[in-house]
Image (cartoon, rainbow, N blue to C red):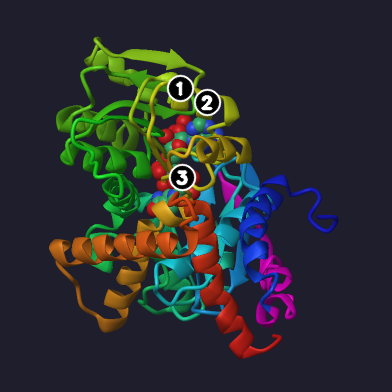
Amino acid sequence: KVRNQHEPEFLQAVQEVAETVIPYIIDKDIYFGKNILLRMVEPERAITFRVPWVADNGEIHVNRGYRIQMNSAIGPYKGGLRFHPSVNMSILKFLAFEQVFKNSLTTLPMGGGKGGSDFDPKGKSDDEIMRFCHSFMAELCRHIGPNTDVPAGDIGVGAREIGFLFGMYKKMRNEFTGVLTGKGRTWGGSLIRPEATGYGTVYFAESMLKTKGDSFEGKTVVISGSGNVAQFAAEKATQLGGKVVTLSDSSGYIYDTDGIDAEKLAHVMYLKNEKRARVSEYIEKYPNATFVAGSTPWSVTCDVALPCATQNELNGDSAKTLISNGCICVAEGANMPSTPEAIHEFHDAKILFAPGKASNAGGVATSGLEMSQNSLRISWTREEVDERLKGIMADIHDSCIEYGKEEDGFVNYVKGANIAGFVKVADAMLAQGVV
Ligand code: NDP
């Protein structure tokens, strides 16, 4: 805690894991005696670098770039890049730490990492985004590789940015390899990768509901965010018979009591992905909906809540409101969107609650499938990838039950995910010695 005292998000993520893993390992000398957890919380490598770039008006800007290579015990480092002004060492270390456990849960051979920059893509032209991405990759390319570290997208890094980043990597290294995932279809990308995190979150929620003999059919679903994860969570929840009534961004949320069906969602995708507009513009086309500025959607009555925007977006009071409004299931699409207080509320009320490292693992799992396809130089069909994704999400759900089921039958998915993720990485570290 002293060493990382200026990193609150990182401490929050470590504390959540420690609270569940320490009781499990305390009487197991093989883990406890070897200080495995202490070794896991220190990144194997944390790189920061200067990213200079020239704006359209000729002005020179400098941002800070990062790559945290957290743990490579079970495979090459793997984890997204985030471009957002809030990015700092604490945020990226928390994300990299979570990624280690998440990647382990997928059963694929991937270590954990995360990176990005405090660059703000909002309001930048395509040319500015390109120049920034090229400058970022001109340095990052020394530290990554298809067998070393394979970054992907995250907040502010979508298909456009992955394209620019890949182009510069290829130029600098003179090689065409699967060094990034989330690539375009015609140059090594996998079908279903764009959909995977959102779809996977809904598949996981579906498995949870199934344990209660329930399903998405007829459920009212509240979703936060309107980016990659939120869009495809909304699509799959609707396909499974749910009615999605909210989406949001950092300016507020839209509430459509009629439901955001496929046609309306296509408009949201146009607004966010092509026009790069605010979600509030939705009400210009659908005036029956309302826009609530500066607020999160957790006060809206629902059966299922899917936080898909950012960390710590759902606090204890919001959790209480969701529970008192009858919410029975919360599955995190974002990373650590629920505060520790919110998680305690969900556990006290004994409702279904899935932490992101389990429920949003479909994205990185499909990135792992993209790596396999690149290595084999083949391309699987949409159905093949979707089936594998469904299988992986079902396996993660089973692992959570194996390690998280309590005496009264309640499944603590946080405990289950943390211990299941920990065991595999810890065993690999033990086998490899103190390195
Ligand atoms: P996008 O950039 O596509 O979308 C992010 C969404 O969250 C936008 O609607 C954005 O609104 C909103 N948001 C971002 N920051 C804030 C904030 N501080 N307050 C309120 N809203 C905010 O990112 P993704 O959809 O890819 O990522 C969303 C979450 O899912 C993140 O936590 C990410 O780490 C996690 N995740 C993503 C994966 C993926 O495959 N993409 C995989 C696993 C997890 P605005 O446009 O106003 O900024």
How far apart marks 1 and 2 lie (CA) works out to 6 Å
Which residue is tagged 2?
Answer: 320
Residue 331 locus on image (x, y percent) = 40, 43
Estimate how packed mark 3 is, as few (under 14), some (14 to 19) or many (20 or more) residues with alpha carbons within 10 Å: many
Q: Amino acid at mark 2?
A: Lys
Farthest top residue in view = 288
Given this view, does label 3 or label 2 mark the residue nearer the observer? Answer: 2
> In this picture, is 240 found above or below 146?
above
- The numbered disc on residue 324 is 1
Q: Amino acid at mark 3?
A: Ala
Residue 50 in which image quadrant: bottom right
Give the residue at x 28% y 59%.
184
- The numbered disc on residue 55 is none
Contact between labelled residues 2 and 3, with CB atoms less than 8 Å apart: no
The residues colored magenta run 29-54
Which image quarter holds the N terminus? bottom right
Give the residue at x 51% y 56%.
81
- The numbered disc on residue 334 is 3
**Secondary structure state at the residue bearing disc 1:** helix
Give the residue at x 47% y 53%.
413
Farthest front residue in view = 408
Ligand 1 - quadrant of the structure image: top left
Residue 120 in which image quadrant: top right
Q: Amino acid at mark 1?
A: Ser
